[in-house]
Amino acid sequence: MDLIAAAPAPQARRWDALLLAVGAYVLTAVGRIHQLFGGLEVLHLAALAAIAAVALYAVDGTSERRAARLAGPTLVLVVLLLGWMMISVPFALSAGASFDLVFNNFLNTALMSFVVAGSVRRVEDVERLALVYFAGAVVYATVVITRFAPGDGASWRLGHLYYYDANDFATFVVTAIPLGVYFVHAGRTFATRAGAAAGLVALTLGFVWSGSRGGFIALSAVAAFILLRYAAIPLRWRVSATALVAVVILGTASDRYWQQMGTITSEDDYNHTSETGRLQIWKRGIGYMLANPLLGVGPNNFPAAEGTLSPLAERQQYGVGVRWNAPHDCFVQIGAETGIPGLLLFTAILGSAFAALRRAGRVERRRPPGAATAPLTPALTASLIGFVVGGVFLSLAYSEMLYTLIALAIGLCKVVPDAAIV
């Protein structure tokens, strides 16, 4: 019997306590739902969900959730990156800033990526968690478009929101859109499919309001992948979903939005001409890495390097203020802050996750017609592509968004036969 096509065991058909805790973690750590509604923040839902998920996973004795089933290069690489970051803490420009990021943030993120992947019992569980991820993005976008309204002049686009800024939010949207396309096609009920279509509209409207150029590039990459490579969904569905997103963009984007998008390739844009533009920041970031090739300047210390090591820092002795810039690029961020070994580990994590999804995709394509679930690997691949492309313009190397997507990829490959080398 084909194991992928086999009917799921009765207990695997349902949500259980661990999966609910993991879903709550995704809604809070990535969707930031507790920050959208003030009354929830005092409950510390993010911490409670993570603690509950870890505890429930620790006592779960089912064979599908054994830690040994997660053995493979992707999680090993995550652990190695975490270890390298720990080693770099004492040598950082500001050890306190590095300690806070590594031990109060990234350690939890890495642990929860393990728990998210480990909680998966069957493909249906990955589908459930993907739906939670998509729903979290839709709720966030809905709150944004109902509470924040772009104005005129300089305020034509969204600014800082809840936890994310407009550019981070745009990348979050781009990572969720492929999952929405999946549920529009493969939702088990009409309500799921209709809700996914409505969710895509909300996400697209929020995306337009973000005015993010990096997000626009990421969305273009994801749209091209969906149209050209997402063969698991019939072409008419891919074209329809892409057309829905395009119609919302064309119908809601202002002239100012298209003017902003038109500056992407302009050499007169501040990112090309200003010393605080992205190109100059990236060049300085590469310089920090080459000057500190082994351990970098320390996790969470790129802004400190801008204020103390950059050529601009010399101005401070003359009373001229210097902006402590963020790296605005995941790869520059990880390379400058953890050195060349950290950059290699980070790149290997991404490559390993894509390779695992590719293996799972080959297995899914061999499934007989009428299998219980539609192939999910193209959707997760598109989501990860969206993050990587968007991350070229953002400082999200340690974000829960990325490691949750990686965890879903690992979890999917764990439960797809012959693809479990993750």
Image (cartoon, grey):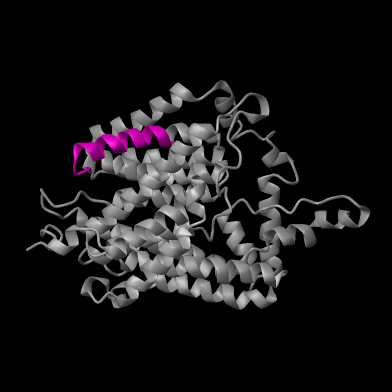
Q: Quadrant of residue 268?
A: top right
Q: Quadrant of residue 87?
A: bottom right
- Identify whether 158 is placed above or below 412: above
What is the x, y in percent for residue 286? 66, 59
**Magenta segment:** 187-203
Task: Tell whether 114 sits left or right of 311.
Answer: left
Residue at point 64% right, 54% down? 327
Task: Tell whether 350 sits left or right of 396.
Answer: left
Please identify the dominant SS of the magenta region.
helix
- Identify whether 314 is placed above or below 256: below
What is the x, y in percent for residue 216? 50, 37
Residue nearer the viewer, 46 or 287: 46
Magenta stretch encompasses residue 134: no
Looking at the rendering, in which quadrant would you find the C terminus? bottom left
What is the x, y in percent for residue 339? 62, 69
Q: Is residue 388 in view?
A: no
Q: Residue furthest left?
A: 1
Residue at point 75% right, 46% down? 275
What is the x, y in percent for residue 277? 70, 44
Q: Is residue 136 in view?
A: yes
Residue at point 60% right, 63% down? 335
